[in-house]
């Protein structure tokens, strides 16, 4: 099993929205960064755990956990002319973007802020501490355990 961090803007889709979704499950759509896409397409597997991270909001940080319940398949929004994520260069025979499906597992006992993550010296490999622009990123087991401990 691997660990991941997925960023989302809570005014667009929050951990609460995931919890309220049918079967508490959603496809993680709209990823339009090639490195993040490659993680989703090639590395994220069934059963992996995901931190849900609220970004671009007043209270930035890790807020909950989801489980990957379906491995990658082409992002349907890339083919939808009415979608903000439409990609004219993508075709069903040659998709450019992929999704995974995640299911709500739990809220953390308390939000773990970006500031707290950055000041925890035991968290040493999380890309969020360095270049936090990536919307999907791997998390080491050590960093996962540190963040879980910080949430209690």
Image (spheres, rainbow, N blue to C red):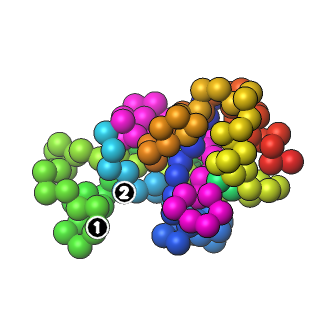
Query: Which residue is at the front of the view, 88 or 26?
Result: 88
In the rendered structure, are the residues bearing label 2 and label 1 in contact, judged by CB atoms less than 8 Å apart?
yes
Dot 1: what SS? Answer: loop
Which residue does the image show at 47% across and 38% down from the upper left?
131
136 relative to 2 in the view: left or right: left
**Percent position of residue 70, x then y:** 50, 46
Q: Residue at x 80, y 48 (%)?
A: 151
Check the image and name the residue furthest to the left: 89
The residue at which mark 2 appears reads as 30
* Element at label 2: loop
The label number, if any, that marks residue 140 in the structure image: none
On screen, 150 above or below 145?
A: below
Magenta-highlighted residues: 35-60
> Which residue shows up at 54% across the image and 58% down it?
55
Give residue 103's position: percent from left, percent from top: 60, 54
Q: Position of residue 143 (x, y in %)?
A: 69, 31
């Amino acid at each position: 099993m691997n660990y991941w961090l997925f960023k989302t803007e809570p005014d667009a889709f929050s951990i609460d929205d995931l919890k309220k979704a049918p079967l508490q499950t959603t496809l993680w759509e709209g990823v339009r960064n090639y490195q993040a896409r490659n993680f989703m397409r090639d590395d994220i597997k069934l059963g992996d755990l995901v931190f849900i991270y609220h970004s671009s909001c007043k209270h930035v940080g890790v807020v909950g956990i989801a489980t990957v319940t379906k491995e990658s398949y082409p992002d349907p929004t890339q083919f939808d002319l009415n979608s903000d994520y439409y990609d004219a260069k993508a075709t069903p025979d040659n998709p450019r973007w992929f999704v995974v499906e995640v299911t709500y597992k739990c809220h953390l006992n308390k939000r773990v802020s970006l500031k707290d993550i950055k000041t925890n010296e035991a968290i040493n490999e999380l890309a969020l501490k360095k270049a936090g622009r990536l919307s999907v990123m791997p998390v080491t087991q050590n960093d996962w355990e540190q963040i879980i401990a910080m949430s209690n």
